[in-house]
Amino acid sequence: MLDRSLIRQDMRRQRSNLSQQQQKVAAQAASTRLFQLPWFRQCLRLGIYHPCRGELPTDAIAAKARHRGKEIYYPVLKAGGQVGLRFANADQARWRNNRYGIPEPCGRLAASPRFLDLVIVPLVAFDRRGNRLGMGGGYYDRCFAYLNQRKVWRKPRLVGWAYAFQQVEEIEAFPWDVRLDAIVTEKAVFMCCL
C-alpha cells in the first residue's frame, strides 16, 4: 500500500501544475460524463463543493443544475471547531470563508445530508473500488458514516469528482471510510456500487 501522506503530496503537486485552461477543459469533459448519469438527471437536491487548491472545477455542474431547476447545497463546517459537515442552500445566500479559507454559504439553516439526493465529493485520490482519499480531516466520512450501515437504500448517492491522474491502484480502506458510489473524471466514469 502506498503511504497516504505521499499520495496526498504527489496529487496536490500534480493539481497545482495544471493551468486554468487545463482545469477548464478537464471539467467540461467530466461534466459531460456526469450529466449522462441517471443519478444527476433524477436528483432534485444536489450537494456540491467549492473547489480549491487545484481541485477539478464544479462551475459547469452548478450552472447545469440551476438550469434544470435543482436545489444546490454547499458544505458548511460545524461551528466551534467541531469536525462535521452540514449542507446549506446556496440560493441568495451570503458567503464567507470558513476556517480553511473555503467559501461557504452562511445565514441559512443547514440541512442534514440525508435530505440530499446526490453529492459531488472532492478527493485527493481514488481507486476503482470507490475508496477515496480526502484532505485528511475526515469531514465527509463523518458526515456520511450512516451510509455504511445501509445495504439497500442509499441516499444520497456519493460521486467522486476528480482528474483521471488522481486514480491510484489501491487505497487501504479503514472501517470508518465511506465508499463512493461512482467516480467521474474527464476520461471515464467508474461505477462502484453495482
Image (cartoon, rainbow, N blue to C red):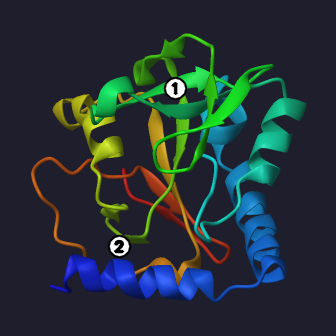
> Farthest residue in the right direction?
67
Place of residue 142 in the rendered image (x, y in percent of width and height, measured from the top left):
25, 37
Quick one: 41 or 80, which is closer to the camera?
A: 80
Q: Residues within 10 Å of mark 2 (few under 14, many from 20)?
A: some
Residue in view at x 59 percent, y 75 percent: 163
- The Cα–Cα distance between marks 1 and 2, rounded to whole angstroms, is 26 Å
Residue 109 seen: yes
Quadrant that contains the N terminus = bottom left
User: Which mark identifies residue 127?
Assistant: 2
Residue in view at x 45 percent, y 62 percent: 123
Residue in view at x 81 percent, y 71 percent: 24
> Farthest residue in the top direction?
109
Q: Is residue 133 above or below residue 11?
A: above
User: Which mark identifies residue 155?
Assistant: none
- Name the residue beneath numbered marker 1: 87
Place of residue 76 in the rendered image (x, y in percent of width and height, measured from the top left):
50, 31
Quick one: 60 or 54, which is closer to the camera?
A: 54
95 on left or right of 184: right
Place of residue 151 in the rendered image (x, y in percent of width and height, measured from the top left):
22, 33
Q: Is residue 79 above or below residue 103?
A: above
Q: Callout 1, which amino acid?
A: Phe
Q: Callout 2, which amino acid?
A: Asp
> Secondary structure under badge 2?
loop
Q: Is residue 23 above or below residue 37?
A: below
Q: Residues within 10 Å of mark 1 (few under 14, many from 20)?
A: many
Choose the circle earlier in sequence order: 1 or 2. Answer: 1
Please report contact status of discs 1 and 2: CB closer than 8 Å, yes or no. Answer: no
> Which is in the foreground here, disc 1 or disc 2?
1
> Secondary structure under badge 1?
strand
Residue 169 seen: no
Quick one: 183 or 166, which is closer to the camera?
A: 166
Place of residue 46 in the rendered image (x, y in percent of width and height, measured from the top left):
62, 31
